[in-house]
Amino acid sequence: MEAEKIIKPANGYLMLAIFLVLFFGSIALMIRYENPIYIITIVIAIIMLFGFILVNPNTSKVILLFGKYVGTIKKNGLYWANPFYTKKKISLRASNFDSERLKVNDKLGNPVMISTILVWRVTNTFKAAFDVDNYENFVRVQTDAAVRKLASMYPYDNFADEGHEEDITLRSSVNEVSEALEKELEERLSIAGIEVLEARIGYLAYAQEIASAMLKRQQATAIVAARHKIVQGAVSMVEMALEELNKKEIVDLDEERKAAMVSNLMVILCGDKEASPVLNTGTLNH
C-alpha cells in the first residue's frame, strides 16, 4: 500500500511569465513574418496552460498520471506541473456533520432517539482519495453505525429504585459517552485518513411510544426520593425534640405520651398540607 507523498511542483508565476511570452510572442511573430510555423509554439503554449495548479489555503491537490499516484500538493500557491497530470481537490478544512435522529435500543432495550455532532478533517489525502470510494459518504455511514453501537452499550438513564445510580448512562455521563464515541469513530474513520476533532451527542430522548410512560416513572422516582429525604429529616427533628425536652426537663413524658407526640410530629412534618392545630385546654390525659 502506498503512503501519502508531499510534492512541490515548479513555481507557477515563473511558468506563467514563460507562457505569456511564448503565447503572445508567437502570435506577434506569426503576424509579422506571416509564417505558419509559429502555430506550433502557440499550441505548445496552450498545452502549457493545462499545467497550472492553484492550491487555496487548507486545501490540497492529489496528482495522478494516467492512474498512477504522483503525490499531493498541500502548500497553498500557484504551481505548474505536467499538463497531463490529473488533479483531484481534497479539502483539509474542519467539517461539521450533524447526523439524522436515529431510533435505536439502549442497553436495557428501551427505544431512544439519538443523533451526534461530529467535527472531522482529512489528514491523509492518499487514504481519503483511494482507500474509500467517497470519504464524505463514508463519514456519514460510519457515524450512524458508531452511534447505534454506542447506544446499545449504555442505558438511557438509571433510576434510584434499581440501585445503579453511579453507572454510566447516555443522559448523565456526557464526558464518558463522548470519549467512547470519539474512540469508536477514530477506529472506524482511520481507514479513510480522517481525524476526529470532536464527537458528542447532539440529541437524546426516549422514543415517542414510551416517552409518556418514562416521564411518569421519572416523576414517581423523584417523588419517592423527595419523600425519603423528608422522612429522614422528620425523624431527626423528632429525635432532637425528644432529647431537648428530656434534657431541659420541660415535661415528663411516659412511653405512651412519647408515642403520641412522635405520631403528631411525624404527621405535621411529613404531611403534604399544613396541619390544623387542636388546642387541648384540659390535662395531658385528655
Image (cartoon, helix red, strand yellow):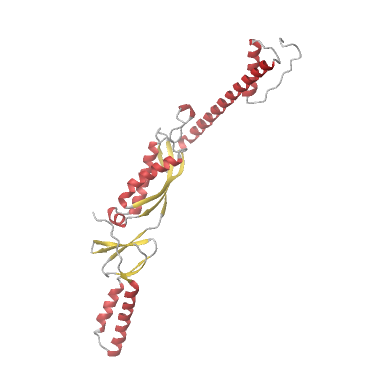
- Position of residue 52 relative to residue 111, above or below, is below
Residue drawn at (30%, 89%) of the image: 32
Residue drawn at (30%, 50%) of the image: 191
Is 220 left or right of 70, judged from the image as shown?
right
Q: State the image quarter where residue 247 is shown.
A: top right
**Residue 116 can be seen, yes or no:** no
Residue drawn at (54%, 28%) of the image: 225
Q: State the image quarter where residue 230 is shown.
A: top right
Q: Nearer the viewer, residue 113 or 179?
A: 179
Is 86 left or right of 109, judged from the image as shown?
left
**Residue 115 can be seen, yes or no:** yes
**Quick one: quadrant of the C terminus?**
top right
Residue drawn at (32%, 53%) of the image: 193
- Position of residue 244 relative to residue 177, above or below, is above
Query: Residue 256, percent across and down?
Result: 64, 10
Query: Residue 49, percent across and down?
Result: 31, 73
- Position of residue 263 relative to residue 210, above or below, is above
Query: Residue 46, percent across and down?
Result: 29, 76
Q: Nearer the viewer, residue 90 or 110?
A: 90
Q: Residue furthest right?
A: 281
